[in-house]
Image: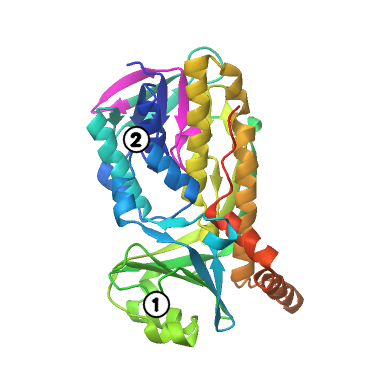
Amino acid sequence: MKTQVAIIGAGPAGLLLGQLLHKAGIDNIIIERQTPEYVLGRIRAGVLEQGMVDLLREAGVSERMDAEGLVHDGFELALDGRLEHIDLKTLTGGKTVMVYGQTEVTRDLMAARKACGAKSIYQAGNVQPHDMKAGRPYITFEKDGETYRLDCDYIAGCDGFHGVSRKSIPSEVLTEFERVYPFGWLGLLADTPPVHDELIYARHERGFALCSMRSSTRTRYYVQVPTTEKVEDWSDERFWEELRSRLPAEQAAKLVTGPSLEKSIAPLRSFVVEPMQYGKLFLLGDAAHIVPPTGAKGLNLAASDVNTMYRILVKVYQEGRTELLEKYSEICLRRIWKAERFSWWMTSMLHDFPENDAFTKRMLQTELEYFVGSEAGRKTIAENYVGLPYEEIE
């Protein structure tokens, strides 16, 4: 088999890159080790930055998002029993975010790929990139008991934190930056109406809480828990009681509870690898970076990587600008580190860190109060939340 761009991973990053490349006339094949149903079964983020919304529209996969997604002009910070509104639209000159689940984004991209006839190979085993640094790269994989070879010009590694792409790069080439947080998020999905029409990020002495939603009838709630906690120890009743205790009284009284559709605990970490390329292999999304979900940046950072890779490849194939390939990593990392900073900051401001002494806790509380009480501070929060602009590819 031959193609121009081989994409490892059929999550939203790989599918979005594939869709954009297909529309630009650049041939690509996606290889995925799981089934489509498994990929769709992942419960993930639901807040899309303005830049990602625009990119999905450019890819021609926004019809259902625009019809069913919830445009949010702001969000709420619950601090010491009161709500502080962050008016995104006003503070950023008209930018907003879209609440639309990652599962739905993936579903739309899968449907678009099927409709256009682009090739995806699911349940591919033992996927391995070769000759990334010298010569013409290729990928080998197994399918239905046979071994296949896919020759290509470039490889896009969109296969996540545990995927083969980053692991295929010699360890001495990479520098890893990581922080593992001493808590996780216990999340519950339920078919109940949202407690508020906007997201609520709550700081509380018992720990952080987040009130989010997937639609006007489906909600996603989170509470901070120690990493030692087990999901099976949390009944629905216990979860709702804990969430209610961390919300301001007015919102706690409005909380509608119901049976959980899904419950899980997600560990929190910050992670970045440099560089994000090795020869003709390029890392995108979680293969190169992880953020704690507090700033809603994980999926959105993957989209900005896709935007950079796509626009570089268009110039490579249409204008012969192969020198741009060497700039991929540095362009991506400039934006990634800023998003990492914001996610780290939001996490530090809103969570209870067991190792923090009384002075540190008071400093963090004062820092957040300063930002919220200042027009410039609110603007800084807002412009990071809606997403910093994508860098132009010159």
In screen coordinates, is 147 left or right of 389?
left
Above or below — where is 294 with respect to 291? below
Is 5 magenta? The answer is: no
| Quadrant, the C terminus | top right
Residue 202 at x, y percent in the picture: 53, 74
Q: What residue is drawn where x is 34% and y is 36%?
A: 33
Give the tally of numbered discs: 2
Q: Is mark 2 on a helix, strand or loop?
A: loop
Q: Which of 186 and 54 is in front in this view?
A: 54
Q: Residue at x 46, y 48 (%)?
A: 299
* Quarter where residue 92 is shown: bottom right
Under circle 1, the secondary element is: helix
Q: Is residue 116 visible?
A: yes
Instruction: Estimate the x, y position of residue 257 in percent, counting from the top left.
Output: 32, 79
- Residue 239 tag number: 1
Span colored in magenta: 142-165
What amino acid is labelled 1 in the image?
Answer: Phe
User: Is residue 167 visible to the viewer in this orientation of the structure?
Assistant: no
Q: What residue type is labelled 2?
A: Glu
Which mark, residue 394? none
Residue 237 in percent (x, y) is at 34, 81
In the displayed structure, would residue 353 be above or below residue 60? below
Residue 146 colored in magenta in the image: yes
Between 46 and 385, the residue placed more toward the observer is 385
Q: Name the residue under label 2.
A: 32
Tell me whether circle 1 and circle 2 mark residues in contact (CB < 8 Å): no
Whichever of labels 1 and 2 marks the residue nearer the N terminus, that label is 2
